[in-house]
Image: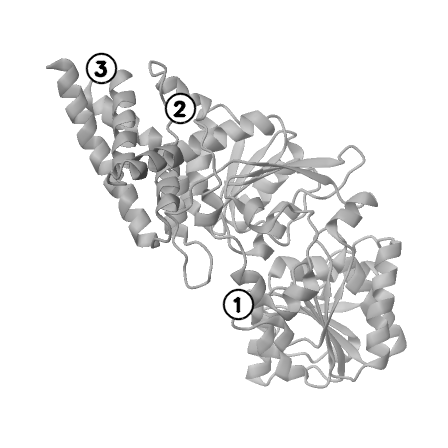
Amino acid sequence: MSQKDFIPETEDKKELYGYQKGDIDKIFERLDNARNDYHLLYQLPTGGGKTVIFSEIVRRYLSQHNKKVVVLTHRIELCKQTSKMLKGFDVKNKIINSTIKELPDQDEYSCFVAMVETLKNRLNDEKLMIDNVGLVIIDEAHYNSFRKLFSSFKNAFILGVTATPLSSNIKLPMHNNYDELIVGDTIQSLIDKGFLAKATTYSYDVGLTSLKVGINGDYTVKSSDDLYMNMVMQEKLLHSYTEKSLGKKTLIFNNGINTSLYVYETFREAGFEIRHLDNTTSVEDRKDILHWFKKTPDAILTSVGILTTGFDEPTVESIILNRATKSLTLYFQMIGRGSRKLPHKNNFTVIDLGNNAIRFGLWNDSIDWQHIFRSPEYYLENLRDDVEIETHFKYVMPDAIRKMFANSTDITIDIDEEFKKVIARNQRSKEVLEKSINQHAVMCVENTSELNQARMLSKLLSDDIESRVVQYVRCLGKTSKNYREWLMEDYKTKLSLAIGKKFRELNF
């Protein structure tokens, strides 16, 4: 295999900005004065130029030290991009990929770029050794897979680089592996200086209490598919796009492949140009899809996971979070895909359909990264949970659903006020829900002519039902999640029975 296979074409050398030069100087102050095995973590927002910064660090380090540099990434796309950028800084480098078993020519290179899993396997085979390494740079350092290689570079200075210095595993906090954190410019500062586009965020309340949390600490794909594939959520997604992002180049992020495919069909049937992409898409198809997305002004691309890192398309004008996440890192990565600035692009749109902005704050809000680095458990424990978030919801029926209940004038109820009334009358608190169920039953019967149609219509009330049950539970005080979920199912069962009763009363 030729050298051409290992070293991609050269990236044009980027001009270093003032804030980048300042951060590089801070990092070299530690490199020059700290012990050889010092572990330093550096934070800079997505779009701030982390790859440019550490490429210049590699160039400068090699000019001053007679030692080698290893750059580690977690994805092959990032390996190729990094190698290309390094070449732009006149750093001769070699990618250690799955085809490399040994390094007989390692003396010809001062810098190596490798995926963490590939390098770990080669080092374990004891056939591939990199001698005289003085600096190891870890891109996307919040991923814990890099820990397994620390012991292979015990005497090297390790520089971790990330936009979010919060470990992907709460049991393995980053302060256990790094001695210090250097924080770069904030998102707002980079916006003010003209380096990032400004985000305008539109949040749509979504009931998330049906979602389950998996062993990785984030919402499971199955529970997300169940929620985001239902008709109400599909309508909400389509409505939010047409209201806030119509005609804009749009990326839609989903948690599950089934949801993304459903989104694809929904938008296609509505007459929009859209493509779907996930990690099962072939290399050729992915290349074609991304080329189409780049060249099509109002393109819509629905995806799962694959475009959160290693993807850079500056012309993106709108980001839709068609999912909820408990990962701060993922939240920033998804929105960051729209933050690149162009001469004709100073702003971009974010549509949040997962209460993410309420949970984490707006993308450009100030964050105390030093506090998160030192006390990640405290930060995570104090994030607002879904029940707390939803107690502040004020449900407003979407126009598309309201049209389905055009014959009904009475479609709302004040759960808090009704609860106070029944307590004052010393009645059962559940009479509040019974009154709510009765109102919903009347709405369904008033707007259909057949029983089955009425029961199908009740499916559109899912968000309204969830909102009412959450408000009722808040009035009760502390209750378990299982009880809330049972109340929701019980409500729907009783609603179906109430519809049948109302229908018989009206027609017989």
At label 1, which amino acid type do we have? Answer: Asn
The x and y percentages for residue 112 are 72, 72
The x and y percentages for residue 45 are 71, 54
For numbered disc 1, what is the local secondary structure? loop
The x and y percentages for residue 60 are 87, 69
Q: Pick the residue in front: 158 or 397.
A: 397
Which residue is most to the left? 508
**Residue under pointer 3:** 449
Q: Pick the residue in front: 163 or 83.
A: 163
**Residue under pointer 2:** 401
Quarter of the C terminus within the rendering: top left
> Within 10 Å of the Cα at label 2, are there few (<14), some (14-19), or many (20+) other Cα atoms?
some
> Within 10 Å of the Cα at label 1, are there few (<14), some (14-19), or many (20+) other Cα atoms?
few
Q: Pick the residue in front: 417 or 53.
A: 417
The CA distance from mark 3 to mark 2 is: 18 Å
Task: State the image quarter where residue 55 is shown.
Answer: bottom right
Task: State the image quarter where residue 259 is shown.
Answer: top left
At label 3, which amino acid type do we have? Answer: Ser
